[in-house]
Amino acid sequence: MNHLDPVRHVRGESQYIDDVPVQQGTLHAVVFESPLAHGRLRAIHVADALNAAGVIRILTAADIPGENQIGGIVPDEPLLAEGHVHFRGQPVALVLAETEHQAQAALHLIRVDIDPLPIITDPRVAAAQGELIVPPRTFRIGDSGAAWSQCAHIFEGEAETGGQEHLYIETQGAYAFPTEMGGVRIISSTQGPTAVQRHTAHVLGIGMHQIEVDVTRLGGGFGGKEDQATPWGALAALGAFVARRPVKLVLDRMADMRMTGKRHPYSSDFRIGLDANLRILAYEATFYQNAGAAADLSPAVLERTLFHATNTYFIPNVTATAYSCRTNLPPNTAFRGFGGPQGMFVVEAAIVRAAEALGVAASEIQRRNLLRENDLFPYRQPAEMCNAGLAWDTAEQVYDLPKLRAEVAAFNQQNEQCKKGLSVMPICFGISFTKTAMNQARALVHIYTDGTVGVSTGAVEMGQGVNTKIAQVAAQTLGISPNRVKVESTNTTRVANTSPSAASATADLNGKATQLACEALRERLLRHACTEYTLHYEGLDIRNEQVLSAGQPADTTWEKLVSSAYWQRVSLTENAHYATPDIHFDPVTNQGYPFAYHVYGTAYTTVTLDCLRGTYTFDAVRIVHDFGESMNPAIDQGQIEGGAVQGIGWMTMEELLYNDEGRLLSNSLNSYKIPDLYSVPQRLDVHFLETPGHPRAVLRSKAVGEPPLMYGIGAYFAVREAIRAFRPAHQPTFSAPITPEKVLLNLYPALAPTATSAVVVSNTAVA
Amino acid sequence: MLHFYLNNQRIRTDQPAGSTLLDFVRYHQHLKGTKIGCREGDCGACTVLVGELQPDNTVQYQSMTSCLTPLGNAHGKHIVTVEGINAAAGTLTPVQQAIVQEGGSQCGFCTVGFVMSLTGHSLSTQPATSQTGLAAIDGNICRCTGYKSLERATEALTQQLAGRDTEQPLSWLAERQFVPAYFQQIPAQLQALRAEQESQPATNGHSTEAAQVLGGGTDLLVQRPEHLREVPVQLVYDRPGLRGIRQQADGRVVFGAATTAENLRASPLMQALFPHLPDYMKLISSTPIRNMGTVAGNFINASPIGDLTIFFLALNASVTVGVPGKGSRDILLSDLYSGYKTLTKAANEQVLEIHFAAPQAGDCFNFEKVSKRTHLDIASVNSAVWLRVADGFVREARISAGGVGPIPLYLARTSASLVGQEITPETVAAATAIAQSEISPISDVRGSVDYKRLLLRQLLFAHFLRLFPERLTFRELV
């Protein structure tokens, strides 16, 4: 079965925020942003702008009727700046005008008085000055300090990963309508409708029941609309609340890029110790997360960095510490992988560092240290139904690793100007919100009297195909055609208190809730069939819309059954609640069983590097992935392909650049490049690992949203391999993205002394 | 009034000629299938097809990003949005089917752009190959799929198009529902429109006297969209006198100021003179932008990194500028730039033609460009070289370089240093050393100073390695 939405997408009939027909009287809102990254906000001068044509109101913090606070985890983020500004692009005022052009024109007439304060953009500088968002966290297992003495080899170094702009093609936006009784209805492009509802209610000083948030679909989210859709929803709502007119707020691309946070850049230190057999005995890592100016989701992202600090390896002695560092950049936020990729890059760097020094292939070390059944992660959850080794070995068989290696070696021997590199990237990713309470969902299922079905859940469709999966679950559970099922918009009045569509867990949580609701309805209908048609309940079933009794067609169909149930006053509606069983985590001891299950896989990445120009093309990415029993291979394959390419983008060309004043330089699509058609791997093979799936996954079909992004990490290491094939004595820094610039400077380090030498020093082996 | 067809609808509008086609389509006609992703031609979500009546009375369709298409450039044409190709009763066109079938649409926001680009590919008069199929969507960015599914869809489509009737493509396509049947009436309707317009020229703030000249819109509508909506503009994109590429009796190649990058790429004359032209052009923007952007616009934008500027600097091209009614003069391209984004041309002088001496048989030419992303990106450094060589000795040389100074640079001393030299590794090394003294790059979002200096050296090596593989080896140079 194909994805349901695409039939509407290809006809241009799917509705996004900016496509909602504009209601008469709508005001258009634009945001006045802080022109400085840090300072005391003395005054906001709006008189001239208020006199401009079409301008109706200009709202500042003083106009907020409730509390000026939208911080989710830590209450440290005002909706509109008050007293201070903490990053360039921070919302300071909201202009409401009759047209968007008039609102934009008025922006130029607003002035602010700001006394500048020192600007920090580097997380290590922030940490040194004690600028931390939350106290540091440490995950620990064994005793790494004591283990060093048993290590035959110890290596240390630094590793850096850059940020990443989400670049959902639909920018952020919201459209708010004042409702009767002084409330607001918001159509929002958000992954977290409840977050928009909760914070808006808080800001307006009214109850959550007065705020309705509705989401049809997003033109991409990737984490960027998990918490960071909230300001725009709340601002539009504030405008509608104050002006009593509909208010539409859609960011233009450059405003979106300037004002919103991105994937967290990390700067990290690592130390790794191995025994003579290349078993990793000890690993220590210190992560400096660049959180930006407010907490946003940074503490949770930081936590997931620690959860995935050892990737898919068993290491008996681990100490991993992470600092969430406050800088004067926009608050960084969720992005597919949620801190996991940043942690995994560092342990892979450590392994590569060791392999290069020891003169062995990194895959030798990787393979010997893969998780086995019941090995403990540093947070004490055992690896159960562990597929790390299976994925690795299957990849070796399916893709013939020795042959691929031989091809690369032969090519490199025969070619001077071009060199190939091959990397192996195994992954392991835990599925669940690490904040246990968030692992709950509800589904509201209506069967209408004609036998059609409407399903509402907390899941937000953003391209990941969750609506199709939910429709499949409903159809399969009820025994009817998916064509009878409509997955409704995500709406806080139909399904309340939802967790955001995030953590790869959306289909699991909302799918399981849908399954529970549909199972209850199915049972109710079959009980009704027993009385109505005098059948035995045992052996009753509905398949392909036909009621079966002991395998034989009974004298009724789905449609008839539903209709008769209605006339017998049987409820055709069910509201089910699902909470992931068995999981728990104690954030004080940093121990527990936080994940429903883990997803595994292995990717081979092959690259060809032009050592003259410093440019590269990816020949192939070959993946073996643990889908469990995929309920929709077409959607799942799309998630793998898209995730891997997004990861490759992060590791290669996507380079966020801020200057020392905290100004974003890569501020548009012409200066921030994401993969295009020609830059993706020529081959991208996805092999479905044969496993029985996991009972905590919906229909045993494992979560697939975030894990593939981390296959992209292999791109960095493949390019690095190719650089070393050209210049074996040189050790490039572990610094991603490995742009053509970094590649060329590493190919010719002697010609660019200032750019590459500094960091090599720290890669020196200490034992 | 501007007059054109939007899908099967006759349009008469008094919206400003310098406003964007995108805003007209979305906010005036309420056709919401065309999406806004970036408003700078870099994502392709707003791609539409623009059909232009040809001298043989057929209509040729090109994909364009409507965010950068001046509304005035729609005058007399057939503009097609997704609503104009959707089949009745919710059925899908073969393009739409292929995308759905192969999983080429996830969030859907970029999808319509791909649909339109591939529909344009279907309407092309050129044979459909895997390569042309991919080229058709090379201006469309997708953040969800990783493109592999879209590649598969394109390939499936290309196979279907293999049977396309070259004589009667429109009826073949209409029969298979690639486009609705009304497309077959469009040529006659555009002819009628043209006849009607000859007596009634369009205005909408468009005048031949307006100081603000507007060509393809690909730079100006990125930089000053509000301004263009408000001031009178002089549209030059469709002015017949400014189109066409020809070779004069004296050997010089002359082309009009409204010649687009795609016109250059598709020109048999240019392809004969520069056999690798398609490879160079593939490095320059994307299919829809090449359909819109003019060479003269690239020159006048004065970007220090303008790809076509660098290309033609090495050919010692000249521009003919003129003031209406007051004659014209020639300026060497290498004299056109007086400083960062400033020109030696007077503000009221308008580029009319561009001309250069055609390379002779045996002359060597090469163009190199490296950017963060190889395609659809602005160069970190670009460079072109033209050499006249006899018996392994350089007789004449011209080398240009972009991204390494405030203006597009003609490397005069580097070029001069080569003259009379034998092509050896030493000669090339010496030339690259001189080049370093002619440039003054700055660190910016396209790269650091160190990088740009090193990269120019590498690109100069690349020129010589490409042109003289029998005389030089990679290892000798680097």
Image: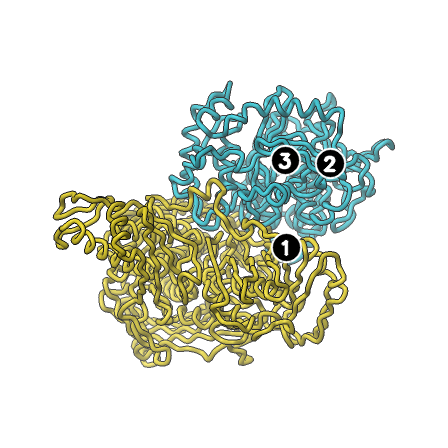
Q: Residues within 10 Å of mark 1 (few under 14, many from 20)?
A: few
Q: Residues within 10 Å of mark 2 (few under 14, many from 20)?
A: many
* Chain assigned cyan: B
User: Do badges 1 and 2 share one subunit?
Assistant: no
- Residue located beneath label 3 in the image: B261
Q: Please, which chain is the residue tagged with disc 2 on?
A: B
Asked if marks 2 and 3 touch (Cβ < 8 Å), the reply is no
Mark 1 and mark 2: span between their CA atoms? Answer: 35 Å
Between A28 and B219, the one lying in front of the other is: A28
Asked if marks 3 and 1 touch (Cβ < 8 Å), the reply is no
Comparing marks 3 and 1, which lies closer to the viewer? 1
Judge left or right: residue A498 versus residue A242. left
* Chain assigned yellow: A
Q: Amino acid at mark 2?
A: Leu
Q: Is residue A498 in view?
A: yes
* Residue B235 circle label: 2
User: Do badges 2 and 3 share one subunit?
Assistant: yes
Above or below, B412 relative to A515 = above
Q: Residue at x 29, y 54 (%)?
A: A627
Q: Amino acid at mark 1?
A: Gly
Between B303 and B442, the one lying in front of the other is: B303
Mark 2 and mark 3: span between their CA atoms? Answer: 18 Å
Above or below, A139 relative to B354 = below
State the image quarter where residue A696 is shown: bottom left
- Residue located beneath label 1 in the image: A25
Comparing marks 2 and 3, which lies closer to the viewer? 2
Place of residue A120 in the rendered image (x, y in percent of width and height, measured from the top left): 59, 73
